Image (tube, rainbow, N blue to C red):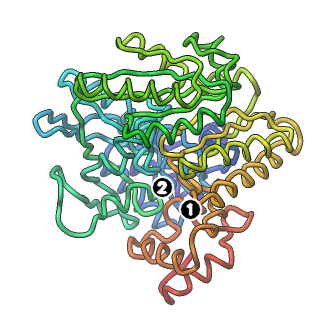
């Protein structure tokens, strides 16, 4: 079957854009997580019609399709758990339409996040969702994972900035959801597909909303001796009536890694720092910055630096944006988590994270979106050491449990993927999972698209657990796994 599958894909996409040699497939067996999965074939379509053709070939041969963007995902979402075809959208990298008057753009899924804002910049517009990997991650992946970023606190995540989607359904049909106008009637199927992690459909074009740049922006760096002081200041700032555009926390180990690498001016002897950005009209922004400064000082900040000019602000942000790359200086491997807790629980949960890491003997660096309680502990280790990966995953599970027990959730922006599928039962009942299974069946997706993701499974990536089987069984005899 493998030979005939390859032949049919080559007829649909072109010989050059169908990869099947073992050395080529190895490149697509991983993303930015620990898990691995080898595909049977990789296709690189350029048009929506070619995506649809590849999907029809996959259906005919009975193999699953896993869509892949830039491969920067942090939950195993692009890993082909069941083999099959990996459909890479990297060649679909065109901005199809830029409409400044209506503040929107239509882009293919392979367009890099930051390139949308660059294209809109001459019109004083930008695309608000800004993951730390925005120089590399693609819009298709942002849509799949409902990506966020530092400015999610004020502007929301990807779903709040997508007006419409062109998608390919599991039978190869091409469908348009939403439109180029706000408030389309009917069910919000666009919102349903955003964040579905490629399990319902494959996105081939995205209508994104563009926002005008704020007239004034001020960035503050508040330096604290202790993590607890900094985390308590997070709630204090918002309680003071200020909703910053961004409110980030960087701990001591992260600053120690960043400073020799980026030279952002972070004090490496501090326990933690808050990077806070306010924006709006000039008078409003100045008032907000003063309120933030006063609140941080009252919360124990030992020093506050203020960036007014674009150059000063860029320097302060450089350390935050370059943090993950800088951590590579401290260990050969790191495992980044993505949990959410109520802001008021940040001090206690962070204490629990540090305690657990110390108990396991695994170093941790925390750099995260403190304003919306989105934690990103980075566990540093060497995956070449036998048993190290398993121990890190065990610690990661304990930290995720801390988040859920504090009233939080298992993901804020990285998605569930294969990484956290077995944690879904912590926050969803059997009935909840049954409803989600019905949605997959309604799309006709079942396990055709990105199998082994989101829903709880056993340790084997392709084996569905008895809990999920029971949930799907409620749908009826037409369901299959």
Q: Can residue 205 be seen by looking at this rendering?
A: no
Q: What secondary structure is found at the residue carrying circle 1? A: loop
Residue contact between numbered discs 2 and 1, judged by CB atoms under 8 Å: yes
Q: Is residue 203 left or right of residue 438?
A: left
Q: Is residue 38 left or right of residue 265?
A: right
Quadrant of residue 249 within the rendered picture = top right
Does label 2 or label 1 sit earlier along the sequence?
2
User: Who's the residue at 41% across and 42% down the image?
Assistant: 153
Mark 1 closeness class: few <14, some 14–19, many ≥20 residues within 10 Å: many
Reading the image, the residue beneath label 1 is 454
Residue 131 or residue 36, whichever sits in front: 131
Compared to residue 460, the image places residue 317 above or below, namely above
Query: How far across and how far down the image is residue 446, in percent?
Result: 49, 71
Residue found farthest to the left: 101
- Which quarter shows the N terminus? bottom right
Q: Can residue 242 be seen by looking at this rendering?
A: yes
């Amino acid at each position: 079957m493998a030979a005939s599958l390859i032949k049919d894909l080559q007829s649909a996409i072109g010989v050059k854009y169908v990869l099947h040699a073992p050395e080529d497939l190895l490149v697509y067996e991983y993303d930015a997580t620990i898990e691995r999965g080898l595909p049977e074939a990789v296709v690189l379509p350029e048009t929506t019609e070619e995506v649809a053709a590849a999907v029809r070939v996959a259906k005919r041969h009975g193999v699953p399709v896993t869509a892949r963007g830039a491969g920067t995902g942090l939950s195993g979402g692009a890993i082909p758990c069941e083999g099959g075809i990996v459909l890479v959208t990297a060649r679909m990298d065109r901005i199809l339409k830029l409409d400044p008057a209506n503040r929107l753009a239509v882009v293919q899924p392979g367009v890099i996040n930051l390139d949308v804002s660059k294209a809109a910049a001459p019109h004083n517009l930008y695309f608000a969702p800004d993951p730390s990997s925005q120089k590399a991650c693609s819009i298709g992946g942002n849509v799949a994972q409902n990506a966020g970023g530092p400015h999610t606190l004020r502007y929301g995540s990807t779903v709040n900035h997508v007006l419409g989607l062109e998608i390919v359904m599991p039978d190869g049909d091409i469908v348009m959801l939403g439109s180029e106008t706000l408030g389309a009637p009917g069910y919000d199927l666009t919102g349903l597909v955003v964040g579905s992690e490629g399990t319902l459909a494959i996105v081939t074009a995205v209508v994104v909303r563009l926002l005008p740049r704020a007239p004034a922006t001020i960035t503050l760096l508040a330096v604290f001796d202790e993590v607890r002081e900094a985390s308590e200041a997070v709630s204090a700032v918002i309680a003071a009536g200020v909703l910053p555009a961004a409110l980030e926390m960087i701990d001591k180990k992260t600053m120690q890694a960043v400073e020799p690498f980026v030279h952002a001016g972070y004090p490496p002897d501090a326990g933690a720092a808050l990077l806070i950005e306010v924006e709006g009209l000039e008078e409003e922004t100045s008032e907000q910055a003063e309120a933030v400064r006063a609140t941080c000082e009252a919360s124990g900040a030992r020093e506050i630096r203020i960036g007014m000019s674009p150059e000063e602000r860029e320097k302060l942000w450089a350390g935050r944006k370059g943090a993950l790359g800088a951590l590579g200086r401290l260990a050969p491997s790191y495992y980044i988590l993505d949990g959410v807790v109520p802001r008021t629980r940040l001090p206690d949960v962070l204490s629990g994270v540090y305690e657990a890491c110390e108990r396991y003997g695994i170093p941790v660096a925390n750099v995260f979106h403190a304003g919306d309680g989105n934690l990103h502990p980075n566990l540093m280790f060497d995956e070449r050491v036998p048993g190290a990966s398993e121990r890190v995953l065990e610690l990661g599970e304990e930290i995720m449990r801390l988040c859920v027990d504090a009233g939080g959730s298992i993901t804020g922006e990285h998605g569930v993927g294969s990484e956290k599928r077995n944690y879904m039962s912590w926050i969803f009942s059997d009935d909840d999972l049954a409803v989600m299974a019905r949605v997959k069946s309604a799309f006709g997706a079942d396990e055709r698209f990105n199998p082994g993701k989101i829903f709880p499974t056993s340790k084997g990536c392709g084996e569905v657990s008895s809990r999920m089987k029971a949930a799907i069984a409620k749908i009826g005899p037409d369901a299959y796994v």
